[in-house]
Amino acid sequence: MASSGSITWPSATEPIWRLNWRLSNDPEGVVISHAFFRDQRVFWKASTPSLRVQYDVQCGPYKDPLDDYVAQPSSRCESEVCAYSYVHNGLRALAIEFYMEIGWYRLTHRWVFWEDGRIMPRLYSAGLQCDCNHRHHAYWRFDFDMSGWPDDAAFEFNNNAGNSGWGPGWSLIATEESRIKDPNTARSWAVLDKPSERGYHILPGHHDGFADDFSRRDVWAVRYRGAEDRRGNQGSASDDMLNNDLTGESLDGEDVVFWYCGHLFHEHAHGGDEWHHVGPDLVPFGNW
């Protein structure tokens, strides 16, 4: 059964975060829309439209649906989706999550919104569908609309790059492009609202792995096109098909959509009970 809601957190008198969420039969997990941090828009929409599973031997590949059909009650969530607050290292956080079972997999899809503006999208996984090593490739789609749209710009950071006018190490991603992680240069990315100079860094998670022959890229920066929001129908088990959206369009001053893929490795020798997780950290910068 589809479910949805709106949250003003932590309270109407202290609205640090305001957002809508929904979980439906569109298999893209808990969808966050119209998210505002301190009354400034961050997301038009953010979701996880694709989860592909790759095995080392002849099993799969699979494309797992993150939808309401597979939602199950958990020790934390009696309903399909639950929202709760907690404190970690003195900072308050709002978490929105749902738990699901797909075959032998046990999965938790979670968004964490911190009071300092950080956002932590996460996918947790346990269970073995086949008794061998495998990887869950989780694709997040972030439609940033910071303080409105378009007027966005996308950037890449490498610590061995010079200053091209945006600060040491930062280079403009002028046109639609896909990229891979490079820990040797501390590579990361950012999306900026040019008029307000507010933005978000996209920092790879510590357990997010790297592109391989099955999932060949780690990020994609594209210009917003409504037809390219395929909800949970992005790609197939064998191909994410995101490069099809790279048509060379300009990103400078346009409405930027940023895709991020985390590659969750699960070694079968660890057994099916150990939980693993992937997901980037989204960190605000500028005057929020």
Image (tube, rainbow, N blue to C red):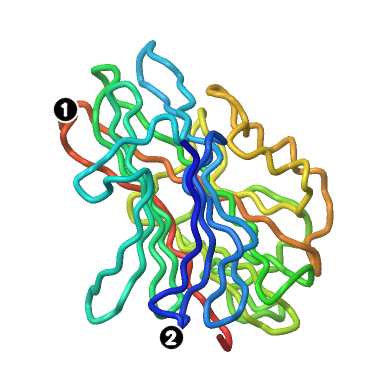
Instruction: Of the two numbered discs 2 and 1 on the same chain, state the one appearing first in sequence.
Output: 2
Residue placed at 45% from the left, 19% from the top? Answer: 61
266 relative to 98, above or below: above
Residue placed at 55% from the left, 85% from the top? Answer: 288
Position in image of residue 22 (x %, y %): 51, 50
Nearest the viewer among 48 and 36 is: 36
Count of labels in the image: 2
Residue picked out by circle 1:
269
Position in image of residue 128 (x %, y %): 25, 24
Nearest the viewer among 134 and 158 is: 134
Q: Secondary structure at mark 2?
A: strand
Mark carried by residue 231: none
Mark carried by residue 14: 2
Amino acid carrying mark 1 in the image: Ala
Q: Secondary structure at mark 1?
A: helix
Q: Label 2 crowding class (10 Å Cα cut-off): few <14, some 14-19, many 20+?
A: few
Position in image of residue 274 (x %, y %): 17, 38
Q: In front of the other: label 2 or label 1? A: 2
Res 96 quadrant in image: bottom left
Residue placed at 56% from the left, 40% from the top? Answer: 49
Nearest the viewer among 153 and 72 is: 72
223 relative to 232, above or below: below
Is residue 12 left or right of 252 when viewed as pictured?
Answer: left
61 relative to 208, above or below: above
